[in-house]
């Protein structure tokens, strides 16, 4: 059995945050427009799925592409285990 996480939610202040809307998938899975948050945190680059309903709705009603967000906090969550792995995702984006 793998190591269990102690915490599953983190509130973080990233740098270089941008929301990206693009079509993903194809092949084994149908292509679908998805929303991701690309950011830097403590020198590491991330590109995580966004599950914040408000941000996701606004982003999907717009055009595909990248939109920078100069200042925001992210609630990063560790999702439920799927196929033996747990994935990080952005559960909320908090802007001023």
Image (cartoon, grey):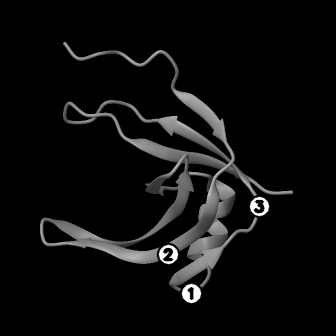
Q: Residue 71 — which label?
A: 3
Q: CA distance from mark 1 to mark 2?
A: 7 Å
Q: Residue 21 — which label?
A: 2
Say whether disc 3 or disc 2 marks the residue closer to the N-terminus.
2
10 Å crowding of disc 3: few (<14), some (14-19), many (20+): few
x, y percent for residue 59: 61, 72
x, y percent for residue 80: 38, 31
Say which residue appears at 43% left-offset and 42% top-offset: 88
Q: Residue furthest front?
A: 43
Q: Are marks 1 and 2 in contact (CB under 8 Å)?
A: yes
Foreground mark, 1 or 3, reads 3
Secondary element type, mark 1: loop
Say which residue appears at 77% left-offset and 61% top-offset: 71
Secondary element type, mark 2: strand
Q: Are marks 1 and 3 in contact (CB under 8 Å)?
A: no
Side of 32 relative to 49 (left or right): left
Say which residue appears at 23% left-offset and 17% top-offset: 2
Say whether disc 1 or disc 2 marks the residue closer to the N-terminus.
2
Task: Indicate the quadrant containing the C terminus: top left, top right, bottom left or bottom right.
Answer: bottom right
Where is mark 1, residue-wise? 63
| Quadrant of the rendered image containing residue 19 | bottom right
Nearest the camera: 10 or 81?
A: 10
10 Å crowding of disc 2: few (<14), some (14-19), many (20+): many
x, y percent for residue 33: 42, 73
Q: Is residue 15 above or below residue 70?
A: above
């Amino acid at each position: 059995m793998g190591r269990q996480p102690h915490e599953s939610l983190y509130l973080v202040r990233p740098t270089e945050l941008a929301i990206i809307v693009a079509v993903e998938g194809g092949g084994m899975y149908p292509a679908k427009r998805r929303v991701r948050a690309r950011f830097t945190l403590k020198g590491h680059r991330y590109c995580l799925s966004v599950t914040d309903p408000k941000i996701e709705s606004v982003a999907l009603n717009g055009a595909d592409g990248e939109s920078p967000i100069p200042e925001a906090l992210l609630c990063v969550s560790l999702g439920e285990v799927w196929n033996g792995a747990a994935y990080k995702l952005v559960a909320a984006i908090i802007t001023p």
